[in-house]
Image (cartoon, rainbow, N blue to C red):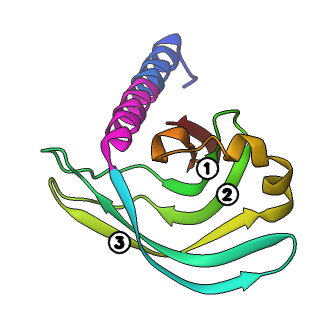
Amino acid sequence: MGIRAKHIVITGALLGIGVLWYTSKLNKWKETMKKLKALPTGIRNFDINFKRVRFNLDVTIYNPTGENFSPDGVIATVKRIILKDKTAKRIATITVNKSFLSIPAKGKHVLKDLIVEIPILENISNWQSLSHIRSVNDIQTETILGVLGKEYSIIK
C-alpha cells in the first residue's frame, strides 16, 4: 500500500495548521512581552578591567496585565538583552539564557544572576551619543529569543 495523494494533502494540511498556530502564539507572546516591566533588584560580583565591566544582576519582572503570562508548550529561551543608545550603538549586553517562565496576572518573578557586560572602550568612543541619554526612554532594548534553534529579535 503506497502513499496516496490523500495522505500527502492531509499531512500537509496538519503541518500548515501547526505552523499557523505556532506563529500566532509567538506573535501573542511578543505583544505580551512588550507590556512586562523589569526592574533591577540586586547587583553583585563586580569584575572590572580596562576593556569592560562585568557583574551579576537580579531582575524582577512584573506582569501588570490581567492575564497570566505563561508561554507553555514552546521550547523558548531568552538568550540575551542588548541595551543600545538612540543611534543603535551597544551600551551593554545582558546574558540571560533562561527558559520562558510563568508570571501570574498582576504578579512578579525574579530572574537571578544575569550576567551584565558593559564595554568600556566602545562606550568611551561613543561618549557623545551617551551624553544625550536623559532617561530610560532614551535607551533602546533588543531582546533576543531562541525558539526551536532559531533566534528572534524584539526591539523596544
Q: Which of marks 3 and 2 is nearer the N terminus?
A: 2
Above or below, comparing residue 29 to residue 92 in the picture? above
Disc 2 + disc 1, Cβ < 8 Å: yes
Question: Horizontal placement of 40 versus 113: left or right?
Answer: left
Is residue 20 part of the magenta span, yes or no? yes
Is residue 139 part of the magenta span, yes or no? no
Which x, y percent locates residue 146?
Answer: 58, 49
Q: Give the residue drawn at x 59%, y 38%.
A: 153
Which x, y percent locates residue 13?
Answer: 43, 18
Question: Horizontal placement of 64 versus 133: left or right?
Answer: left
Q: Cα distance, mark 3 to mark 1?
A: 20 Å
Q: Cα distance, mark 2 to mark 1?
A: 5 Å
Q: What element carries label 3?
A: strand
| Residue to which mark 2 is pinned | 92
Q: Give the residue drawn at x 64%, y 34%.
A: 86
Q: Quadrant of the N terminus?
A: top right
Which x, y percent locates residue 4?
Answer: 53, 16
Q: Which amino acid does label 3 sit on?
A: Val
Q: Which amino acid does label 1 sit on?
A: Leu
Work out whether residue 115 or residue 145 is closer to the camera in this orientation and state it.
115
| Residue to which mark 3 is pinned | 110
For mark 2, does the 10 Å Cα neighbourhood hold few (<14), some (14 to 19), or many (20 or more) residues?
A: many
Question: Horizontal placement of 94 versus 72: left or right?
Answer: right
| Residue to which mark 1 is pinned | 83
Q: What element carries label 1?
A: strand
- Magenta region, residue range: 18-36
Above or below, comparing residue 15 to residue 141 in the picture? above
Q: Give the residue drawn at x 18%, y 61%.
A: 107
Q: State the image quarter where residue 103 is shown.
A: bottom left
